[in-house]
């Protein structure tokens, strides 16, 4: 197992065609719209309602986290946005266009490690670009940029088996961003990491987001994580899940770990813990 310098270096801005483009919608349409989305799962014992008329929207470049008790449908929302699950009712719009299945306009990062074990770090990052027919030189430039961004310079020839969990997730984030999706969907990507590595990965992700300004929808059980990362936190009810409350997070950006020691952070945490506790108690009754 190898461990790199965990500090994310200052990024020298380079020109990567089509990678730095992030245009604010001139129509005023939200980047992502969830409209009255419901999901019912059929089982041998009957039907189970996972989501009940859930609606919210995300603006261009916004970082949104979804928080809620276990089983409230957080991951179901994400899978519907990704096109991996069909909604039973309602619809999802990305840039005003209805989503009807998976597509390259949405990048996914899961909790489990989804790297190709037979490919090197660099090959994993550029895999999607190669499928698109991007030239070798441009792929090399893009890989170099993201290796620097995630702090893994010098590891481009390593294979996933040689990397720690945190390093694998850095590569997964770099791969998702390298494909230049319209939105990045993250399903508890740091849930399997130890506390220290998780904190570091949160800062790595924020630096990547501040540089790319991608729209991000991030699922988490961790209240501190949701506050630290987000522009807005959406709290969901116990099953059947629906939106309970939106909490705008006005902590100054850019952020680092020191913000977690502030009074303002503590006030957000107290409010969110109270909301989640109420819903968790409902879930176990």
Image: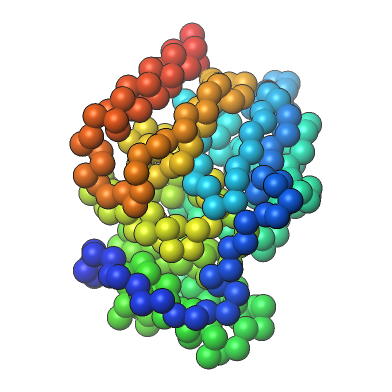
Give residue 89's quadrant in the image: top right
**Foreground pick, 67 / 168:** 67
Horizontal side, residue 187 vs residue 98: left or right: left
Indicate whether 169 appears above or below 224. Answer: below
Residue 9 percent coordinates (x, y): 28, 70
Residue 258 percent coordinates (x, y): 21, 44
- Outermost residue, top direction? 285
Asked if residue 41 shows in the view, the reply is: no
Horizontal side, residue 86 vs residue 198: left or right: right
Residue 279 percent coordinates (x, y): 48, 17
Horizontal side, residue 118 vs residue 76: left or right: left
Query: Residue at 65% of width from left, 49% of height from top?
Result: 31
Asked if residue 245 shows in the view, the reply is: yes
Query: Residue at 48% of width from left, 63% of height from top?
Result: 212
How many numbered marks appear?
0
Query: Residue at 34% of width from left, 64% of height from top?
Result: 167
């Amino acid at each position: 197992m190898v461990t790199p310098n965990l500090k994310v270096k200052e990024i020298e801005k380079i020109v990567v065609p089509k990678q730095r483009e992030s245009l604010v919608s001139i129509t005023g349409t939200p980047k992502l719209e969830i409209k009255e989305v419901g999901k019912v799962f059929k089982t041998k014992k009957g039907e189970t309602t996972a989501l009940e008329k859930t609606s919210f929207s995300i603006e261009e470049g916004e970082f949104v986290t979804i928080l809620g008790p276990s089983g409230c449908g957080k991951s179901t929302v994400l899978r519907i946005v990704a096109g991996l699950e069909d909604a039973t009712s309602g619809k999802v719009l990305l840039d005003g266009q209805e989503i009807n299945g998976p597509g390259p306009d949405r990048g996914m990062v899961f909790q489990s490690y989804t790297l190709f074990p037979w490919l090197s770090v660099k090959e994993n990052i550029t895999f999607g670009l190669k499928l698109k027919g991007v030239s070798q030189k441009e792929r090399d430039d893009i890989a170099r940029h993201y290796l620097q961004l995630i702090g893994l310079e010098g590891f481009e020839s390593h294979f996933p088996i040689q990397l720690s969990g945190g390093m694998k997730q850095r590569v997964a984030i770099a791969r998702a961003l390298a494909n230049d999706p319209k939105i990045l969907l993250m399903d508890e990507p740091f849930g399997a990491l130890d506390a220290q590595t998780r904190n570091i990965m949160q800062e790595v992700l924020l630096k990547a987001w501040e540089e790319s300004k991608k729209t991000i929808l991030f699922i988490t059980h961790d209240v501190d994580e949701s506050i630290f990362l987000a522009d807005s936190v959406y709290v969901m009810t116990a099953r059947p899940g629906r939106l309970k409350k939106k909490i705008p997070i006005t902590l100054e950006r850019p952020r680092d770990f020191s913000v977690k020691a502030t009074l303002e952070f503590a006030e957000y945490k107290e409010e969110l813990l109270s909301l989640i506790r109420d819903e968790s108690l409902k879930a176990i009754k």
